[in-house]
Image: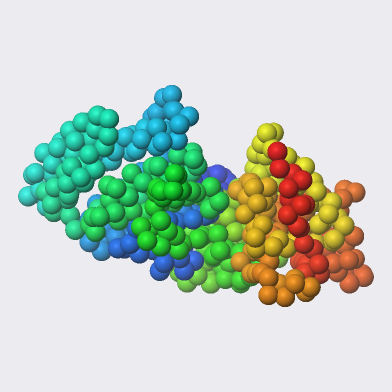
Amino acid sequence: MDYDLRSQEIEMAVAKVERRAERQADEATLYKTYVDSGVLSEVSDTESQIIYGRRGVGKTHLLYFHRQRVSEADPHTLYLIVNCQTLASGLTGISSDPAVAGRMFFEEFLNTLADSLFDNISRLELIQPGRRNAESATLAFVETINQTGNGFDFRNTASTLEKFRNAADLNKIYVALDEFVSIPEAVQPYFAEYLKRLFAANKNVVIKIASVTYQTKLLETIDSRQIGLESGADIFGDINLDVHFIWDENQEAVQLFFLQVLYNHLADLLGWDLSVHRDVKARTIVATFFTQEKCVQELVRASEGNCRDLFNLFKLAYSEFKRDPRPGSSRIGLEHLKSASRQWYRIGKLQNISGKTRDEEFLNFLIQHVIKERKARTFMVHFSNWKHPVLLRLLNLRLLHLLRTTWTHPDRPGEPYYLFTVDYGCYVDLKNTQSEPEADLFFPAGDKTYDDLVPLDDRRSIRRIVLEKADLDRFLV
């Protein structure tokens, strides 16, 4: 079907695309629009796990899809998703002492858990009317958590939760903690310790934690004693969504994935058939919205592996198209995408840099030292320095991106180096400024492809672009 992109139908559909899974009122829509990149096979139905990923990469959507899949496979399960942002909002006067604050957060979590049990009693009784003791078991759980006094009675609390499971005739209870990053990093190990004491010994309870990759701390050693959840023993941190969407390393698969994501979200609003083959979905998006396939490639590259950024860039590019006064403009073109990338870089990423750090200075250093002087977007960092604070902060802000590939320096064989890439939007923002690299250094003389694209790095030259620890330390506060 040939759509008029300036029609009210298309305009409303683009506007209604929901960028945050937790704000989607209809959970059935979340289930229908989910696209599996291959990560679903890594989500265990029996083991407690951490789901890592930067903001907007799809952790919440994955949790809701997994809940639907588990519930359909076995109605005798209860899958509770707790948004940790609500825990923080429910507390007043949070202590500066991490141990005390951890206790406060955990008490709020238990109250939220109790509310969730009550909320699900009616649904459980509809499935099997004989579950009449679930309410009294829940009341016993509430009474237990309200009698914590000076210390948690983990044994009794776990026992009453198990009584609820038996009374409700449940095979398993899943407890998913979304937005775990909302709990202060210093507090996280204490909160994790309480989770371990309550749930670790119960094989009928499965924990899922969704958290930001570089802002999660589940284990800490205090006074020679470890507290928290140990990865590989108490919980498994083997799911990292960031590594599934790196365009530089798997271009065709990543582009196809993002085209399916766009199709599914728009199809639900435009009445398109969600059952068609993924290749049909990809062709439909390209033919309907873009002047050429190169536009899609640049949209996906600019998204830097992040679904929420994809939606924001798509919406901004569509708005730029709508404002384009040229009569021949009927689809989203490269100029619209470049403008959208520049806007999103400035309003969605750059302005989030904290004034309490020297991160903006470090970013300017990268612009001058890597992009302008060395004619690249990508640089190398020794494996011992890749978690340096100035790198992690820009990674969390999505101003830097970590590639999955590790390389070796030509002069230091055997020592792995991590590859970091400066954000696509940053390069676009430099175009037509004094800091823009000479394009002939990327493309053969006379090739004007660079007018439309952010150049692809020559990986051979990157081997000589190394940031040492001294370079990073200069920008510590």
Residue at 77% in and 69% down: 463
Residue at 17% in and 46% down: 159
Quarter of the image for residue 102 reads top left
Residue at the far front: name it.
224
Q: Is residue 327 visible?
A: no
Residue at 53% in and 53% down: 213
Question: Is 138 left, or right, of 470 in this rendering?
Answer: left
Question: Is 302 left, or right, of 181 in this rendering?
Answer: right
Using the image as rendered, state which of residue 102 and residue 212 is in the foreground: 102
Residue 432 spot, x, y in % from top left: 87, 50
Residue at the far top: name it.
93
Residue at 69% in and 62% down: 382
Using the image as rendered, state which of residue 230 and residue 270 is in the foreground: 230
Using the image as rendered, state which of residue 386 and residue 260 is in the foreground: 386
Residue 294 spot, x, y in % from top left: 70, 65
Residue 25 spot, x, y in % from top left: 39, 43
Q: How is colour applied across the structure in the image?
A: rainbow
Quarter of the image for residue 300 reads bottom right
Residue 444 spot, x, y in % from top left: 89, 72
